[in-house]
Amino acid sequence: MKNAERLLAQLAIVAAMFLFWEMAVRTGLANARIVPPPSEVLPRTIMMLGDPVVLHNLWITSAQVMLAFVLVAPIGVAIGLLLGESDYFGRAFKPFFFFVASVPKSVFLPVFILAFGIGFTQKVAFGMFQAIFVLVISAIAAAESVSPDYLKMARAYGASRRQLYIDIYLPAMLPVIVEGLRLGMIFNITGVLFAEMYVSRAGLGHLVSTWGMSFQMVNLFAGILLAASLSIAVNELLRWYENRVGAWRG
Amino acid sequence: MAGLSVVETEQTAGSAGAGLRVENVTHVFETGAESLMALKGVSLDVEAETFYGIVGPSGCGKSSLLLMMAGLLLPSEGRIAVGDKTVSKPLPEEIGVVFQESSLLPWKTARENVEFPLYLRGIDRRVRERAALEMLELVGLGEFANHRPHELSGGMKQRVAIARGFCQDPDILLMDEPFAALDEQTRMTLGDELLHLWDRNKKTVVFVTHSLTEAVYLCDKVAVMSARPGEILEIVDIDLPRPRTYDMMATEKFGRLRARIWELIRRTQQR
Amino acid sequence: MSAGADKTKDERPFWLAVVASPMTMRLACLGAIMLFWELAPRMEWVSPVMLSTLSSTVMIGFANIDVFLANLGVTLGSLLLALVIALGGGAVVGVLLGSIHPLRNTLLPIMSSIYAVPLVVIYPVFTAWVGIGVESKILFGGVYGFFPMLLATAAGIRTVDAQYMLAARSMGATRIQMIVHIMLPAALPSVISGVRIGGALTAIGVIVAEMMAATAGIGFLITQNRTMFNTAEVYFGVLLVVVLAGTIDWLISVSERRAADWYPQKVKAI
């Protein structure tokens, strides 16, 4: 199947799902009071993009997500590269990161509230905390994925240390690191939204949570659709970049 | 060979036609408390512009020896020299290496891979591009210059790796089982192409291989090594005329040389 | 980097080698963290509301251990049911999507896009539909772990060596026999890693649900204590979850390594 054809088929499937959803509500298969039809939800989502209250909260969420990402990305990648390249630090601290990566980090949220209160700082810190482990682990994997064959070859041809970094390490590691950034971004977004839904006075998560508790189902579904499409867009953008720098992986 | 001559002007004068001397080299691996002797008192005199083979049973240290010749590994004792220069680090202007195809950089195209050694030396982009394209033409991959390794077959990849070694244009070219990953038919074809390249562009070649037929067919001399610790058992003169042709393989002389090498290896394996 | 000699003969005295070993470093860091945990609140470097001392955390926690265990039991019960939905459902749909050609090419990318959606935002839908009892967190945990299990299973099925399939077909295997005898066993390493990731996410889903709206469970207990500023109880609850999850994950990873031992292709890949 060609790419365009596949994309068309995918769009058709998504459209069919919305159609099924609409028909289910219309025919009374689903209760319209608790499952609002897409014919109401989709226009509401569009309207939200012009609603100053929603936009303000969306901006707060985005600012937290972006700040957390900008702060955590270099830290996580640097730690991961150190652990992947240095035998000593790797053996000392890799088990720690693998262990923490395997436990549910959401359970730490109350601790962040105790430490930072509720607000911007706490959300950013929690987003960073959610993202850092996957960043570290993929950077370790990236460092370990550099084939010794390439290094041996480049050294035999007289590569300087700088040339080794720029021409071997960097291109070899980049796709894996970008993949880690993408996963870190997903965890970061999830962490910030969760923190906003848990206890907060602002943000998209806060809005969604309020709509849910007050049974404003159309708003709730529209808000979910908004959060979902924004996350998918960010994910696809990073995935596009990942495929571009990793096209050579074949 | 215009591309190559452009690069040659970059070379230090007087190094043309260098040979390689291995003087009483011993190599000991230190792994914690244990130490393992891989090579013991190996001496070789590789004269300029000869095609020199090294064969031996698996684990006899021939790959370590090659790494030392490339300046990537230091001998525990003894020394390796090009002219009067001791090899203690990679000398890309004098010594080149053809690695197995797995050393091609997957994110670079065939042409970028071939010109990589020249790029590392800071040679002008247009010069190195032209040299690389010519080299690719010579190995029959002109039209694949912009393909990445994962789009090429194993034989094509190995051709690119050979082109890369020649493009670097050193006096001495080391090859570590370059055809090991290929099927027999491809190996034979590539062997012929390699001889052809070497004919047009005489270099000192040190060729490590597992294949006895390949060693006899390609080389002027073949050093046969013993099982670990690797020592030189015998240096077999391959006094077949050049250019080598396939019908030589059917001659009695070819068979005798091959059998002689096999006899030496068989005996050291039983030991 | 100029020369390549790797002579790493250790000339250091024995005691220095022990002190400077990575293991010692790790233990020293762990000790430092525990020491800081104890001293920081005690010396009032940080407010005791932010952090309770390690000793009081453990003591208060064990004084109330029955409450913690009862709520942990509720959580584990919900988790078990959620795992059935997540792992069972994910495996079945994964096999379907992985083995049917046109489906996997069109649907799998959609599924992995859904993976990017922060699923927390749909929890209010579940509470609106079924209330804040156990049903909502079982459903939510099930949905949370479903997609990774599906993707891992489908990926495992997809990478089954075509040679095996060809050999089985030449011996006259039926479609069901192919799935049971070839596809599932060959996909097992991937499926097990799906169980590990999907299982972890299911647990996260259940606990997250309990934290946001629930009437019982360890997540609920932690949140309840946080609103009452019972700092020691909060930390003890978190510690309990971390230790439990870490142990379970370790057990799974051990069995995963076992599975890898049975599978030569997996060993070769390492």
Image (tube, rainbow, N blue to C red):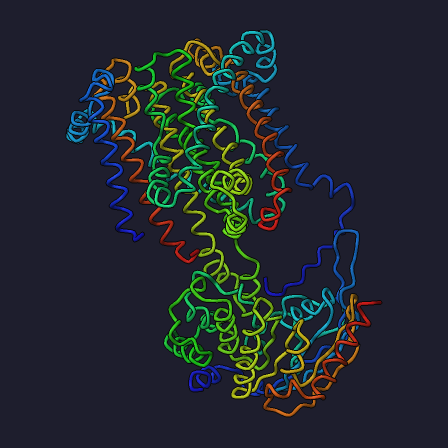
Residue drawn at the location 42% of the way across and 29% of the way down = C146
Percent coordinates x, y for residue B50 in the rendering: 64, 86
Residue furthest toward the front? C172
In the figure, is residue C140 to the left or right of B58?
A: left
In the figure, is residue C61 to the left or right of A62?
A: right
Residue drawn at the location 65% of the way across and 73% of the way down = B209
Residue furthest toward the bottom? B241
Q: Where, by quadrant of the figure, is residue B173 drawn? A: bottom right
Compared with A125, C21 (above or below) is below
Percent coordinates x, y for residue C192 in the rendering: 54, 35
Quarter that holds the N terminus of chain C: bottom right
Compared with C207, C97 (above or below) is below
In the figure, is residue B103 to the left or right of C127?
A: right
Q: Which of A13 and A202 is in front in this view?
A: A13
Compared with C73, A94 (above or below) is below
The number of numbered discs placed on residues in the rendered structure image is 0
Q: Nearer the viewer, residue C193 or B91?
A: C193
Percent coordinates x, y for residue C257 in the rendering: 62, 38
Compared with A53, B119 (above or below) is below
Q: Where, by quadrant of the figure, is residue A98 drawn? A: top right
Q: Where, by quadrant of the figure, is residue B256 drawn? A: bottom right
Q: Nearer the viewer, residue C242 or C19?
A: C242
Percent coordinates x, y for residue A137 in the rendering: 51, 41
